[in-house]
Amino acid sequence: QVQLVESGGGLVQAGGSLRLSCAASGGTFSTYGMGWFRQAPGKEREFVAAISWNGGNTNYGDSVKGRFIISRDKPKNSMFLQMNSLRPEDTAVYYCAASRGGRATTQYYNYSYWGQGTQVTVSS
């Protein structure tokens, strides 16, 4: 059973940066696609970024393209989200997710495992 734990969230001013981490344990993490989603109060869950099992393919949500970078460290069973030029509208709980399909899928229903989330708050 895969377990995912996010870290790195916090409070930052607009224009600043944060780096989220996701630590995975159990399962065959090295074959899984990985992704980040976020959910703000009163809003639907939103796709942020995804990376394929080998790191060769990535996808980004339109609202974060050019500002966020997803990466993974397979030997360390970790995934990261470097968030730059943060905006108040990036405020949300950010979730790490793993997909057994192995692709950089953008659809939340393709992800079987989810972390507990980490809060990111961007002040104006």
Image (spheres, helix red, strand yellow):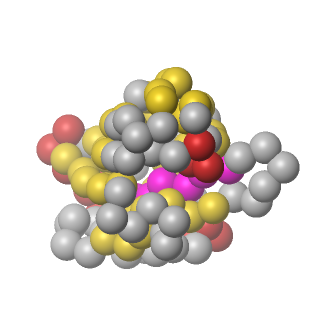
Residue depicted at x 84% and y 49%: 42
Q: Is residue 30 visible?
A: yes
Q: Residue at x 50, y 60 (%)?
A: 48
Q: Is residue 20 above or below residue 109?
A: above
| For residue 44, above or below residue 84 | below
Residue that sits furthest to the right in the current view: 42
The answer to which quarter of the image holds residue 95 is top right
Residue at image location 68% in from the left, 50% down from the top: 39
Residue 110, by quadrant, is bottom right
Q: Which residues are magenta?
A: 32-39
Residue lying at the far top of the rendered structure: 11
Q: Quadrant of the C terminus?
A: top right
Q: Residue 21 in the image: state x and y as whole percent.
A: 36, 36
24 on left or right of 56:
right
Membership of 37 in magenta stretch:
yes
Residue 64 percent location from the top left of the image: 45, 62
How far from the left and from the top, in percent, is residue 74? 20, 50
Of residues 34 and 39, the one drawn nearer to the viewer in this rendering: 39
Residue 112 is covered by the magenta coloring: no
Q: Main secondary structure of the magenta part?
A: strand
